[in-house]
Amino acid sequence: MFKVRGNKLEKIVETGFELEGKLEGDLESWVENNPSLLGEDLLIIGRQVQIPEVKDKIDLLAMDVNSNTVIIELKRGEIKDPVDVQSLKYASYVSRWEYAKLEEQARAYYLERNEKDFNFNDKYEKFVSDAGVEEEHIPEDFNREQRIIIAGSHIGEKLGSVALWLRNHHIDIKIVEFSLFKDGDNYFLSSQIIIPPPAVKGEDIGKRPIVGNRPWISNGEVWHLEERCGKAMKEKLIQLNNLINENIEEVDGPFWEQKFYVSFKVENHNWLIVDTSKNSLILTFNVKAGVMNAKQLSSELGVKLFEGSLTRSEKVQLESSIDLEPRGEHDRVRLRIKEEFNLSSESFLKFIKNCFLSFKESLN
C-alpha cells in the first residue's frame, strides 16, 4: 500500500494485529460495523451468539441477500484448524433454526443497540432493497442454506486445503485475509478474498459455488431430491412427478438440470416450475389469462390465500397457500406446498388438469 504525495509514492508499512495490540474484539467491531469488508452485503444479527448445545459462541452471525445464515469466525492471527471444524459445528446447529428463532436472535441484538421499534421483516427487506435486490426475487424461506466465512491475518495451508475440499463438495465456505498497515498514528485495513480463488469467474456471492461438473447438471434428480429437498418435500416432489406422468400424457418432464427448480413443459414451453427447498415446494403454473380465480382456487384446494400485504414472518409461517399474478397473455398461479398439503386429493388432481388444459388452449 502506498500514499500519494504529488508525483511521489510513499510506502505504508504493513504491521500486525498483535504487534499493535489489536484484539479479536477490535476485529469483530470493525467487521460488525462494516461487513462489506468480507466482500459482500450482509445483515449482522448477532455478536458472540451463544450455541447452547456446545456451550460456545459464534463471533458474528449474519443473513445474506438470499436469506441464508452466515457464520462468521474471526482470528487476529494466523487462520488455521480447528476453526474450520468449529465453524462447521456452528453451521450444523444453526441449520435447525427456523424463522422465529432467527427473529428472536435479531431482535435481542438490535434491542441491545437501542432500536426499540425493531421489526425483523422490515429490517431484512430494507437490507436486500439497499443491496439492489428486487422484492420478487427475495426467497420466502429463511435459512435454506448455511454459509461460513472465516477471516484473519494469515491463512494456514491446512485450512486452505480443507476449505477448497469443502467447496468442491458444495459447502459454501469463504476465507478472507486481512492486512493491517500503519502510517504515523493512523491505521489502514485491507481485505482480500483468498478462497474462492480470484480466478474463479461467474460465481454469485451467497450461492453454492460452481465447481467441477455442477451436480444439478450431472445428476439433477439426485441434487433436487437429496440436496435441495427435506425428507417430506422429497416425497411430495416424487409424488407430484408420478401424478403428472400418470394423468397427463402430453406433459414432458421433469427436467432436473436447473439449480433451484424443476420444470415440466408442454410443446417445449414451460408449463410448471417447481422451486425446491427443505420445507416447501412452490409450484408456478402458466395458465391462460383470465380463466382462473385465486379465491375460488383457495376454497377448492383448502389452502390460504397468499396476500402480498403479509409480512415476511407471516408469509414464512403461513400454511400451504395460493396466489395468482397476471402476466400479459398468461396468468401465473403460484401454489406453495407445505408438509400438510394433500397431493392425493381429487381437488388437486382436478386443479393440475385444469391448469394443463388452460395452458394448452393458450398455445393454440
Image: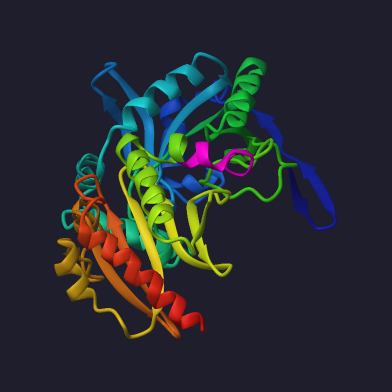
Residue 220 in the magenta stretch? The answer is yes
225 lies above or below 362: above
- Residue 248 picture location, percent across and down: 42, 61
Give whichever of 272, 62 is nearer the camera: 272
- Residue 105 picture location, percent across and down: 23, 40
Q: Quadrant of residue 234?
A: top left
Residue at 40 percent of width and 70 percent of height:
356
Q: Is residue 67 visible?
A: no
295 horizontally vs 243: left or right:
left
Quick one: quadrant of the N terminus? Answer: top right
The main secondary structure of the magenta stretch is helix
- Residue 94 picture location, percent across and down: 33, 31
Give whichever of 224, 86 is nearer the camera: 224
202 lies above or below 304: above
Residue at 68 percent of width and 31 percent of height:
14
Q: Quadrant of residue 180?
A: top right
Q: Is residue 109 visible?
A: yes
Residue at 30 percent of width and 62 percent of height:
335
148 horizontally vs 337: left or right:
right
Residue 303 in the magenta stretch? The answer is no
290 lies above or below 2: below
52 horizontally vs 195: left or right:
left
- Residue 342 picture location, percent across and down: 21, 50
Q: Which residues are magenta?
A: 215-224
Residue at 69 percent of width and 35 percent of height:
212
261 lies above or below 162: below
Give whichever of 356, 114 is nearer the camera: 356
